[in-house]
Image (cartoon, helix red, strand yellow):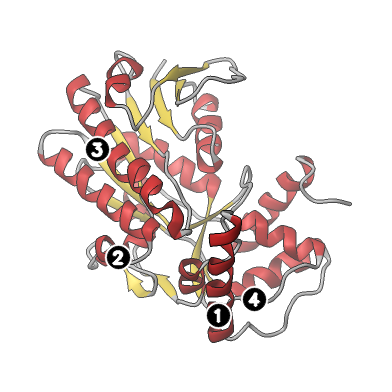
Amino acid sequence: MRRALVTGGTGFLGRNLVERLVADGWRVFILKRSAGPEREAENVSFVRGDLADPSTLASAIPDNLDCLFHLAGDTSFWRLNNARQHAINVEGARHLMNAALRKGVARVVHTSTVGVYGTSFRDIDESSPRPGSASPIGYIRSKSLADDLVLKAIDEGLPATILNPCSIVGRYDTHNWSRLIRMVHDGSLPGAPPGSTVFCHAGAVAQAHIDAVDRAAVGERYILPGPHASYLDFIACAGRLLDRSTPARPTPAGLLKAMGAASLLASYVTRREPDLTPEGAEIVCGHQSVASLKASRELGYVSPSLEQMIADAVDWMRKDGRLAS
């Protein structure tokens, strides 16, 4: 039985990955920072460790590990969280890669984001420039800096691969695209962003992580794309699946950015992360497209249609009671 340690194993993508690992016969350990209820299942258990505390990581990494999947990360677009985000995404990656090197882990798959290529880009592939480390957006900057740390660890002998998913849609999403789907369902959507992006399916991305263990080359990165669509297209598709009306035209970029700025100002008073920040507005007003087929060629990666992705998310949200009747 192969053995995996997963960071972020209780999160959106992590739950998809753990589910598939178990189905494939893996023994899975999930890194958990704090004490609390733990619902262990067959071939799944928790190990205590904190990415912010390197002294806890060596003992947290099991012996004879076949792969360490590093999915944990802070995905906030609120600048008041930048310090916390840097500590988790950058320093946490540094501590984990150092621990994996010392432990002699046989394989590491590091989950990054296509955002390291910027907020707007056209027909990129793995060789395209990655300006993310200089981005004013905390999430993009932190993930790009984490990539740099993983590359440094690879130079030092760590057998790691980097995966760069696009905008992930699917089951177990509680606060990303599910918020947009819920607003479409409830009729509370204020408008449609004017940008476009590349969507990918949580299940397909999880499978790519598993396939990368044996098929990906050490030191390589793989963009995980899917259908390119506008946010208006995404919202319209969700509306059809939910039998709800949706906006016919996108909200002007200037108005959306003004809303983000106003929400940020209000958050300084409420101390709560708003649904739309200036950073988030910048991203959804941009346009992104991917030309890479590397993951398809080398990992056997296959993406479903956008409708299938959204249907998967909607079905899970209904079953989980997140969409009122």
Residue at the extreme front: 269
Give the left or right position of residue 58, taking residue 180 as reference.
left
Spatial CA span between label 2 and label 1: 32 Å
Report the amino acid beneath label 3. Arg
Of badges 2 and 1, nearer the viewer stands 1
Query: Considering only order in the chain, which callout, 1 or 3, is on the residue closer to the N terminus?
Result: 3
Residue 229, horizontal then vertical, whole percent: 55, 72
Q: Is residue 216 above or below residue 273?
A: above
Dot 3 alpha-carbon crowd within 10 angstroms: few under 14, some 14 to 19, many 20 or more: many
201 displayed left or right of 103: right
**Position of the N terminus by quadrant:** top left
Looking at the image, tell me whether mark 3 or mark 2 is earlier in sequence order.
3
Task: Please name the residue that numbered disc 1 is placed on.
Answer: 258
Q: With respect to residue 321, does 248 lie above or below?
A: below
Marks 3 and 4 close (CB-CB < 8 Å): no
- State the residue at coordinates (39%, 70%): 119
Q: Which mark is residue 192?
A: 4
Marks 1/4: CA–CA distance: 14 Å
Q: Measure the C-alpha gap from mark 3 to mark 4.
A: 38 Å
Q: Quadrant of residue 212?
A: top left
**Residue type at mark 4?**
Ala
Q: Which element is circle 3 on?
A: helix
